Image (tube, rainbow, N blue to C red):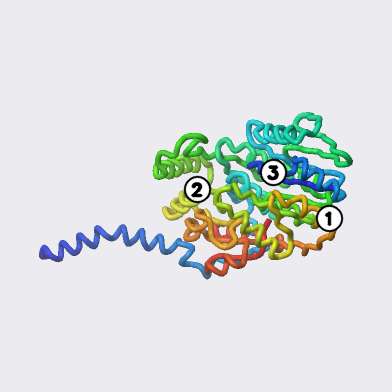
Amino acid sequence: MNSETKLVLKVAIGLLPFFVLAIRLLSILPILNADATVGFSEILPKDCKGSNVMVLLGSGGHTGEMIRILENVDLNEFSRTWVTSSGDSKSILKCKTYEEDHLSGSIYSASFLSLHRARSVGEPITSSIKNTLLSFYYTFQAVYTLPNLPSVLLLNGPGTSVPLAYILFGLRFLGLANTRIIYIESLARVNSLSLSGKLLLPISDRFIVQWEQLSMQYKRAEYYGILL
Amino acid sequence: MSVLILTGATVTFRSLIDQVTSKEFITDISKAGISKLFIQYGNESANKSQIYFESSIKKSGLLYENTDGIYNSKSGSLQILAFPFSSDISGEYIEQVDIVVSHAGTGSIIDVLKLDKPLIVVVNESLMDNHQVDVANEFKKLNYCTISTCSGLSNEVARIFKEEAKFDKFESCSSSVMQSVIYNEVKLAH
């Protein structure tokens, strides 16, 4: 083997992991598998009962929309993980009321996960990059403590959606989770997506908007009317 | 005839509170034939909403009684009842009144439209990144509600009351859509 052949082989072997990672990413990126993603099931198969559904409650308006959307959904067949930001007592109260009103008869458990906020109220924003990294770190820490990872993550757009969704997507990339992401854009977004929406469009398995004019702008956006 | 004012539970809409506790507003809606005014004034942490509401009602010179944040007051034939928030706002208040004035929060708007009550939306222009305007305009275009400024509110209330304005019935999507999306995704995760 001459030195040139050796060099070519070395480079090829060196690049191989990157090709593998790229192929893995392409194979799981929902945006590249658009046709496969808009299905409905009226019945839940028996072996899916007890699966975990994780719901993120952002704050004020986002929580209000999510709880109203869930008024039309029956989560009795699933275990639930409610995620709130630390200190957001109103959202915790709302999901506990929802549990009492709708899920008191469920044989599956409910758990509550609190996400540490990267910045406390009143603290100056010294570095947004630092805060972003910190919120990824805190979210990862919180997800790491979970006994089992969710089958479905339900989000409706508060800023905390982004680290949570990307961490669960990262775990799926590594083959450590099967979490599918359902993103519902806020009813308040009529003509353009929110920043969270834009960032989560590529990795969401279902991307649902609540205004028809918004669904026209994005091929993957599904529209069924107002979900509240 | 009764009017309910929803100012938002998490962020109190201060200029709307100023408006609906003002002497002119109270006189104007009394003249228009309103006999009961309910005000949901908000639930910001550290009693901030209540402190603000109390200073507003004091400014207007109204006599009031306060029992644990529930304010009772009377001005001529108009009875006023104010409360911070309700965990069952639909059943306790929206269902009982004739006209609702609401901040442009999506949750409140939908709660009112679902009960088919005449709705006047007031947009809070002091909120940053204001997508509330978009959603209020969209609902107005669909003839689900009307929009008012704070200062024009008493006229709008009188107009809606007098004309018995007819709005279109709100339609949300088939309620089982999200259920079947969730079922489908759980199945695919398996």
List x then y, in percent, for residue B47.
66, 32
Q: At x 46% / y 49%, what residue is drawn? A: A167
The residue wearing badge 3 is A99
Residue type, label 3? Glu
Secondary structure beneath label 3: helix
Mark found first going from the N terminus, 2 or 3: 3
Please tell me whether mark 2 or mark 3 is closer to you in this view: 2
- Asked where in the image residue B83 lies, by quadrant, the reply is top right
Give the Cα separation between the discs numbered 3 and 1.
39 Å
Please tell me whether mark 3 or mark 1 is closer to you in this view: 1
Eyeballing the image, is B173 above or below A146?
below
Q: Is residue A159 left or right of residue B36?
A: left
Q: Residue furthest left?
A: A2
Residue type, label 1? Phe
Mark 3 crowd level (few <14, some 14–19, many ≥20, 10 Å Cα): some
The residue wearing badge 2 is A164
List x then y, in percent, for residue A112.
59, 40
- Asked where in the image residue B161 lies, by quadrant, the reply is bottom right
Mark 1 chain: B
Please tell me whether mark 2 or mark 1 is closer to you in this view: 1
Q: At x 47% / y 60%, what residue is drawn? A: A202
Mark 2 crowd level (few <14, some 14–19, many ≥20, 10 Å Cα): many
The residue wearing badge 1 is B161
